[in-house]
């Protein structure tokens, strides 16, 4: 008598159907994942800039010196640049001599773009905190990515030195809608 063994296995049709269902599920998940990734980049950039501003203010208070936040110039230098979207540096501003680089952030090619927004006709090129933690002027900023203003984030530094981040994407913390290029 011949014994037959039965093996449990998938047929080719079952395997193809399983792969097709998996492909459909992945194609539905990828856009949501991409949106989540872009939202996290915006939030991360806003949090990093807010952290740098708070660090500068705390440094001014604890070290009893003027501290500034400005666009990054040359890497590792205390020289300010002109483009906020390239990143920023935190430096001391002594009465005489060269300041000390306290912190630096260089933006990557995929990072959202940080830019200053004019307030009372003045666009911030630096944010200075005095030894009392006060900012010299109010400064407004927006952070935009390629999806436009509906997803943009806003930050504001008021003259008391307080730093505020807008709670709602697309709406400026100082009021009104954000505009992204």
Image: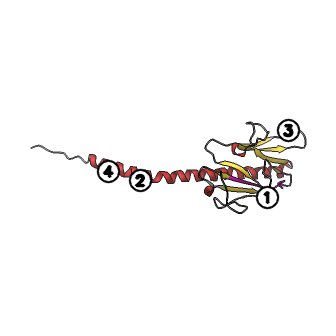
Q: Nearer the viewer, mark 3 or mark 1?
A: 1
Q: What residue is shown with label 1?
A: 158
Q: Nearer the viewer, mark 3 or mark 4?
A: 4
Return the disc, 3 or 1, that comes first in the chain's sequence.
3
Q: Earlier in the sequence, mark 1 or mark 4?
A: 4
For label 2, the crowd category at 10 Å Cα-Cα, with few meaning under 14, some 14 to 19 and many 20 or more, is: few
Cα–Cα span, label 3 and label 4: 68 Å
For image coordinates 69% across by 62% down, the residue present is 176
Q: If you read the primary sequence from the N terminus, does the residue marked by circle 1 or circle 2 appear first?
A: 2
Which is nearer the N-term, disc 4 or disc 2? 4
Q: Earlier in the sequence, mark 3 or mark 4?
A: 4
Which of the two marks, 2 or 3, is nearer to us in this view?
2
- Label 2 belongs to which residue? 25
Tag 1 secondary structure: loop
Instruction: Name the mark on residue 98.
Output: 3
Q: What element carries label 3?
A: loop
Query: What percent of the width, then of the height, locates residue 118?
Result: 76, 54
Name the mark on residue 17: 4
Q: Where is residue 138 in the image (x, y as percent from the top left)?
A: 80, 56
Span colored in magenta:
129-142
């Amino acid at each position: 008598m011949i014994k037959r063994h039965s093996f449990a296995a998938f047929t080719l049709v079952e395997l193809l159907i399983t792969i097709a269902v998996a492909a459909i599920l992945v194609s539905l998940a990828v856009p949501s994942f991409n949106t989540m990734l872009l939202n996290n980049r915006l939030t991360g950039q806003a949090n990093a800039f807010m952290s740098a501003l708070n660090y500068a203010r705390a440094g001014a208070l604890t070290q009893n010196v003027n501290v500034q936040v400005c666009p990054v110039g040359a890497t590792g230098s205390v020289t300010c640049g002109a483009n906020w979207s390239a990143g920023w540096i935190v430096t001391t501003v002594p009465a005489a001599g060269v300041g000390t680089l306290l912190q630096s952030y260089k933006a990557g090619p995929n990072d959202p773009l940080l830019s200053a927004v004019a307030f009372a006709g003045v666009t911030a090129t630096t944010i200075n905190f005095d030894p009392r933690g006060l900012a010299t002027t109010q400064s407004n900023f927006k952070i935009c990515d390629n999806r436009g203003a509906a997803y943009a984030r806003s930050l504001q530094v008021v003259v008391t030195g307080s730093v505020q981040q807008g709670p709602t994407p697309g709406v400026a913390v100082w009021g009104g809608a954000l505009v992204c290029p």
